[in-house]
Amino acid sequence: MGIIGSSLKLTAGNLAVRFGSYLYRILMARMLTPQEYGILSLALPLQFLVVVLGSAGIAPSVAKFVAEHRAKGEPRRSAAVAGAGLVYYTLAGAALALAFVVLSPIIAGAYGIESLSPVLQLSAAALPFGFALAVLTGVLQGTGRFGAMAALLTSLQLLRILLAAGAVALSATAASAVLGSTLGFAGVLALALPLTLRELGRGGMKEFRRLFYFSLPVSVSSALGFLLAFLDIILLGFYAPPEEVGIYGAASPAARVALAFAMALSAVLLPRVSALSASGRRGELTRTLAGSFRATVAVLGGVSLITAIFARELVVLLFGATYAGAAEPLRVLVAGSFFYGLFSVSTGALQGLGKPEAPARILTLAVLLEVALCLLLIPEYGMMGAASASAASSAAAGVLAMLALYREVGRRKPGA
C-alpha cells in the first residue's frame, strides 16, 4: 500500500482520537457544571501526556526498530525489542504514575483547588496502561498493520466515552469523568495484546537500551510537544477561575482536531523515510516529502479556515451557549494548529532520517517562547492572551522544523 493510502488508514484512527477526545469533552461539558468541567480541563493534560508520549515518542521508536529488523530478515530481534519495550515501558509508566500520585496534593494546593488532587491521581493511573498500549501500537505500525492500529485507536476513544459517560451519570464530578477515561485505557490494552502476541519475544535490558536511547530524544520531543499544547491552559489556571478555564477548555481541543491528518502522515512517513534514506533513493525521498507537505497544507488549511469562519456557531452547537466565549480564542488557536501540523510532518521525516534530536531542540525553544508569552499576556488578556501565546509558539515551531528538514535533505547526497 502506498504512503497516502497508509496515511488515510491512520488518519481514520487519528480522526477517531481527535473527534473521540472532542466528543468526550463535549459530553463532559454538558453533563458537568462549568466549575467541574474547569477542574477536569486542568486534569486532562495528564492523560494527554499518555497519548503524546505514546503516539509521538514510544510508538515511533518501536516501529523504527521493528521495521528495520523485519526488513533485514531478523524477526527474532524484532520480537525481542518489542517484548523488552513492553516490559520496561510499562514499569516506567507505573513509576511515573506513582510520582504524580504523590505530587497531586501539592499541585492542587498551588492552584488552590483541593478537589483537583483526587482527579489528578485518577488521571495518573492511566500512565502504565497507556505506555504499554503505545508499545503494541508501535509494533502494529512497524509491521505495516495500519488498519489494526486505527481500529485500536478508535476503540480507545469509544470505550473512554462510554465508561466516562456512565460514571458521570452516577456522579456528576470531574473525578468520575477521569475514572471512566482511565478504565478505557486498561480495556483497550486487553484488546491489543491478542493482536500482537505473535510479534512479542523475550528481550532484556540490552534490547531496551537500544530502544530507549533512540526513543529518548523522541520522547523528549513528545513531552515538549505536550507542554507546547497545554502550557496555555495549565498557566491560565493560575490566573483565572475554573469556570473560565472550562470555557477555554472548549476552544483548545477544538483547534487541534484538524491535526489528525498531519499526525497520521507523520507516523507513516517515519518508516518510509527511514527505508528510502537507507537505500539512497533521494529522488523518491524528495518526491515523497513534497507530496506529503502539499497534502498537509491542503487538508489543514481548509479545515482551519472553515473552523475560523464558523467558530462561534461550532462552539454553540457543540457545547451550548454557555461556552460561546470560546469562539474568539478558537479562531486564534486554529492558526497555530496549522503550523503545528507542518511541524508534525517535518518531525516524522526528521526522525526517519535519524535526526530525532532536531525536533527536541526546536520544541525547547518553542516551549520557552510560550512560557514567556503566557506570563506576559495571560495576566492582562486572559483567554485571548493564552491563545495568542500558544499560536505564536506553534507557528515558530512549524517554521523552524521545515527549515531544519530542508537543510538535512539538502546535505544528503544520492546513496547517503
Image (cartoon, rainbow, N blue to C red):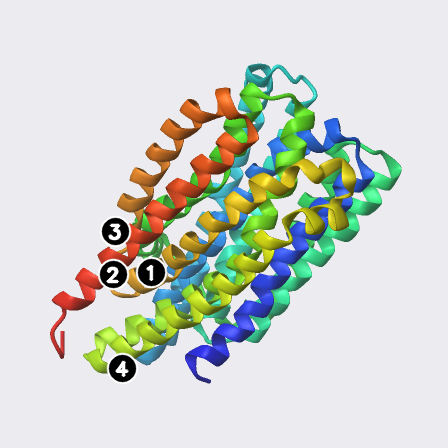
Q: Is residue 275 above or below residue 42?
A: below
Instruction: Estimate the spatial distance between the alpha carbons at disc 3 and disc 2, rounded to whole Å.
Output: 9 Å
Residue 354 screen position, x and y as percent: 24, 61
Instruction: Estimate the spatial distance between the alpha carbons at disc 4 and disc 3, rounded to whole Å.
Output: 23 Å
What amino acid is found at the position of numbered circle 1 in the picture?
Ser
Total tally of numbered discs in the picture: 4
**In the displayed structure, does residue 365 sit left or right of residue 167?**
left
Q: Mark 1 sits on what residue?
A: 346
In the rendering, which numbered label is found on residue 284?
Answer: 4
Q: Mark 2 sits on what residue?
A: 405
Instruction: Estimate the spatial distance between the alpha carbons at disc 1 and disc 2, rounded to whole Å.
Output: 6 Å
The residue sitting at the right extreme is: 170
In the rendering, which numbered label is found on residue 358?
Answer: 3
Q: Secondary structure at mark 2?
A: helix
- Crowding at dot 1, Cα within 10 Å, few <14 / some 14-19 / many 20+, comes out as many
Q: Is residue 85 above or below residue 319?
A: below
Q: Secondary structure at mark 3?
A: helix
Of labels 1 and 4, earlier in sequence is 4
Residue 3 screen position, x and y as percent: 42, 78
The residue that appears at 33% across and 43% down in the rendered structure is: 363
